[in-house]
Amino acid sequence: MTAATDPPRTQLPRVVVAAPGSGHGKTTVATGLMAALRAAGQAVGGLKVGPDFIDPGYHALATGRPGRNLDPVLCGEELVEPLLLHAARAHGHTDVAVIEGVMGLFDGRLGGDGFGSTAHVAALTRTPVVLAVDIGNTTRTAAAIVHGLATFDPTVRVAGVVLNRAGSERHLREARSALEATGVPVLGALPRDQAVSAPSRHLGLVPVQEREEAGAAVDRLAALIADNVDLDAVLEIARSAPELAARPWDPSQAIGALPIRALGRAARSSTPRPVVAVAAGPAFTFRYAETDELLHAAGLETVAFDPMTDRDLPPGTCGLIVGGGFPEVHAAALSANTSLRSALRAAVADGMPTIAECGGLVYLCESVDGVPMVGAVPAMATMGARLTIGYRSAIATTDSVLAASGQRVTGHEFHRTTCVPTPDTGGGATQHTASGWLLDGVADGFALDPAGTGGATLHTSYLHTHWAGHPELARRFAAAVHTRAGLLVREEATA
């Protein structure tokens, strides 16, 4: 690569908030830092390591910008730095990026030697690490933990520590004294404060969209951090991060040219963008920001609707995405909205391009725990005691609105429900033609051809995919939506 084609070098102040393990207060410290720095006049970008959807909701509340994810498993190592740079420019100038880690600092994909871990992302982006360490039940041992984390991998720079759940002044002095020998500066210490803890349930924290008090809780976090953590020292660490040398991810470049071409110029100029209706509201909160950006780059308009309250789909809907969330928690309200359930069932039956992931699959089933749902998928969902979680290698079993047969992707499962197909009562067009994916060789979900068009217009599965890592999925879905809208026709049909 010559100097003329080298990507521009970008100075982006940034810091990773990590911990020895889950439960040490990463979300408290990271979200609090985001909110406190914003309150201090900084333009803050919030990011999360891994596939998590819930923490980015709190980040969005703290920063005033969409939360984003950095996941080398879902998107590949080569996209981590470009996605970070994209996040830093997508909503205007960013003064500092705060990246919340996942699990323990060196914990990644099982069997992957730390691949996908917080340390992996910190090393890929050359970002200094601030540790959140719970000292509620220890003193000097905290220093041994910090020393081990700081010296375990020389490619990871541990630049500071925030102590969490500090008790008495004597307790704090003992921990601080021991930490001096590690050479890792203590940036602050948070007292025990249950008022700032977020409630949890079967899949982790309760999403911010379901908590009316979430805004006040984030404000308390900002005040807690501002009062107990040296923000200037944190900014100094963030500004010490070296320049980034990648080009920002660009959704227009990622989506490329659609495998279809437009009708006449008059039709293109006089017709608004086809609408993709995207389920939102308290029941459907699992969604990556890059999904909307890719679809917009493909000439589509995404419009959110709330299946709990909206009586019909948005005007002009030509495609449908029902992502993950908690339909099982809001089953009664979702079921009571019979008008929208009927509209969705009719749209899917008519062959509208539809994608449903995880909670979306559950919602499109006939029922969840006996409560009637949309009924577009011939299956019944039930809650179980066992959590299904982990990265999956997936293969498409048939051509569908989302993927071509044999397409390979990497995704993530995270659910407690299961879906069981209802008995085949007659082989009509509503019967599924194949599973949505093979997940590590196991059939999952449904690929349906409800309108009998000869191709699966409905693709459902428990698998969450990040389209930045697999833009061909967005490209294929966008092509189907444009075709549905009648604004574009397949090249082979006009050759």
Image (cartoon, grey):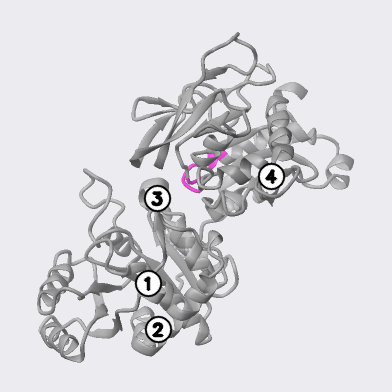
Q: Quadrant of the C terminus?
A: top right
| Residue visible at 51% across and 50% down in the picture | 286
Q: Which residue is mark 3?
A: 203
Q: Is residue 320 magenta?
A: no
**Residue 368 on image: x %, y %:** 52, 34
**Residue 195 on image: x %, y %:** 40, 76
Q: Which residue is mark 4?
A: 277
**Mark 3 / mark 2, whichever is N-terminal:** 3
| Residue visible at 44% across and 61% down in the picture | 55
Q: Amino acid at mark 4?
A: Ala
- The answer to whether residue 381 of the structure is visible from this angle is yes
- Report the magenta residues as a range: 466-473
For residue 28, the mark is 1
Which element is circle 2 on?
A: helix
Q: Nearer the viewer, residue 58 or 362?
A: 362
The image shows residue 429, relative to residue 50, as above or below, that is: above
